[in-house]
Image (cartoon, grey):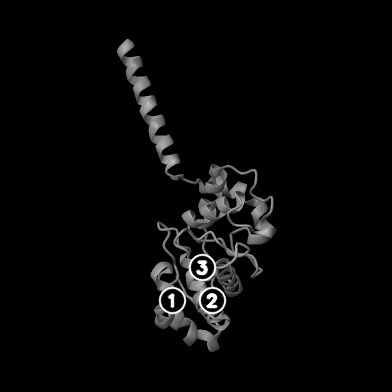
Amino acid sequence: MLAHNTLRTLLFVLSFGLVATAQGAGIMKGDAAAGEGKAVTCSACHGADGNSAVSTFPKLAGLGEKYLLKQMKDIRDGRRPVAVMAGQVDNMTDQDLADIAAFYDAQERTSEMADEELVDLGRKVYMSGIMERKVAACSGCHSPSGKGNGPAGFPGLAGQHADYIAAQLQMFRTGYESPEGRTNDGDSKIMRTTAFELSDLEIKAVASYASGLRQ
């Protein structure tokens, strides 16, 4: 009996250690079913299925679980100030946010149409970048089809509102020089560096092109 109890204790300690290690490493599995109920208040802006009707609010459907979780945590913890999100996730735990991320990532994103007049320029920036200004191709991280890279935390852009994509690029461009812009792209500053070298027209064109892609 003593040996049996000792074994059970050892297994418990080992299991707890594994959970603690996983959480410490930032690994958290979301429950989409639980997230559906927790996301009810989010639907007012982002839509019940994560497809917002207004272009100022991003579509969250199929955006990538890892990316969604990071953004919500950054907003909650003050690393990404978003005025319209003030107070929305302040009292949510990491698990709450993981569940919401899992729910929205499981939804199918609706499609959008690119502006035909901007397609050529948008395709050039998205697929090839701008060599003379050392602007990397968007397709390298977000994929040629715009589906993104979920495991790496790069969001899918296909079907996202063009106005929203453009607004975020402008915020990253501002963040290159000022903390008033968006700065939560990590120490590599990959988005800030890229956006800083883009003109207003290039931002509008690449946002439109990415929006019109099909995953």
The answer to whether any part of residue 120 appears in the image is: yes
Residue visible at 38% across and 30% down in the picture:
15
Residue visible at 44% across and 40% down in the picture:
24
Secondary structure category for the residue under label 3: helix
Picture layout, residue 42 above or below residue 1: below
Residue visible at 44% across and 83% down in the picture:
124
Picture layout, residue 111 above or below residue 33: below
Picture layout, residue 196 above or below residue 14: below
Picture layout, residue 203 above or below residue 19: below
Q: What percent of the width, then of the height, locates residue 141? A: 41, 67
> Is label 2 or label 3 in front?
3
Q: Which residue is mark 3?
A: 192
Q: Which mark is residue 207?
A: 2
Q: Which mark is residue 135?
A: 1
Q: Residue 51, located in which quarter of the rendered image?
A: bottom right
Q: What percent of the width, then of the height, locates residue 104? A: 54, 56
Q: Nearer the viewer, residue 183 or 71?
A: 183
- Which quarter of the image is occupied by the N terminus? top left
Amino acid on which disc 2 is placed: Ala
Q: What percent of the width, then of the height, locates residue 114? A: 54, 81
- The answer to whether the residues at label 2 and label 3 have Cβ atoms under 8 Å apart is no
CA distance separating discs 1 and 3: 11 Å
Q: Residue 179, located in which quarter of the rendered image?
A: bottom right
CA distance separating discs 2 and 3: 15 Å
Secondary structure category for the residue under label 2: helix
Residue visible at 51% across and 53% down in the picture:
70
Q: In this image, 140 relative to 171: left or right?
A: left
Amino acid on which disc 3 is placed: Arg
CA distance separating discs 1 and 2: 15 Å
Q: Which mark is residue 73?
A: none
Q: Residue 139, located in which quarter of the rendered image?
A: bottom left
